[in-house]
Image (cartoon, rainbow, N blue to C red):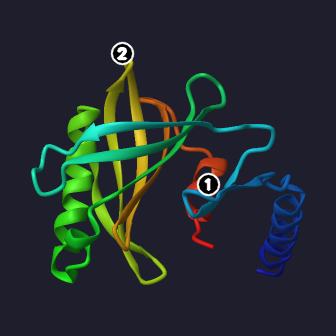
Amino acid sequence: MKRLSRFLSIFLAFSFFLSACKPALKMQEFKSGPGGFSVQVPPDVEFTETTQEIDSGNPDVGILSLHNYFMSITGEDVYQIFYYDYPVELASNPDVSEDLLNGARDGWLNTVNGLLIEQETELSLGNFPGREMVVEASIDNQDMKIKARYFLVGNRIYQIMVGVPKDGEFTAAMEAFLRSFALP
C-alpha cells in the first residue's frame, strides 16, 4: 500500500511537471472598429475583409450587408467571423430574438447546405443570447466540419466559426478563438 501511495505521488508530480512544460498557446488580438468586436487569433495571420449584399429571403428583413472576416491557416483550417444588421424596428421587439436566432441558423445552414451533427446549445455573450452548433457542410467542393457560435446583439447577428476537413479535429487555438470573441 505504501508503495502504491508513493507511486501515485511520483506520477502526480510528474503529470503536473509535464502540464507545466506544455507550450503556452500563442494568440494575438484582432479588433474590428466597424464591427465592434475583438477576438484572439493565431499570430502572423490576417483576416481578409469583404462586404457583400445578400437577400435575406424575408420581405420584412430585405437586403442585408454581410461583413465577412476570413482567414485560412493551412489551406484547410478556416477561421471566420461575419456580421450583419437586421432592421432596427424588427430587432427592437424582445419577443422576436428567438426567431432572429433561428432565422440566422437556418439561413446559414441553407447557404452552406449544412447538416447539424451535434445538438445546438444555448449560450450567451454577456446579456446577449447566442447558440453554438457543429455542422458538416460542403464548401467549395470540400467536405468540412464547422463549429459556429452566433449571437444577437441588439439588431446585429455575429457569427464566429472555425472549420476543418470533415475527418479533422478542432485545435486548441480554434477553441480559444471561439471563446475569445468579445465586445468592447
Residue 41, x across and y down, in percent: 69, 49
Q: How far apart are the two marked residues, 1 and 2, measured between alpha carbons?
A: 25 Å
Q: Is residue 132 left or right of residue 36?
A: left
* Residue type at numbered disc 1: Phe
Residue 163 against residue 149 in the figure, above or below? above
Tell me the crowding category of disc 2: few under 14, some 14 to 19, or many 20 or more residues within 10 angstroms, Cα based: few
Quadrant the N terminus occupies: bottom right
Q: Identify the residue at image location x=87%, y=63%.
A: 20
Q: Name the residue under label 1.
A: 177
Residue 153 against residue 181 in the figure, above or below? below
Along the line of sight, the residue nearer the viewer: 133 or 155: 155
Along the line of sight, the residue nearer the viewer: 106 or 33: 33
Q: Is residue 99 left or right of residue 177?
A: left
Q: Is mark 2 on a helix, strand or loop?
A: loop
Tell me the crowding category of disc 1: few under 14, some 14 to 19, or many 20 or more residues within 10 angstroms, Cα based: many
Q: Identify the residue at image location x=84%, y=75%.
A: 9
Q: Identify the residue at image location x=34%, y=38%.
A: 53
Circle on res. 141? 2
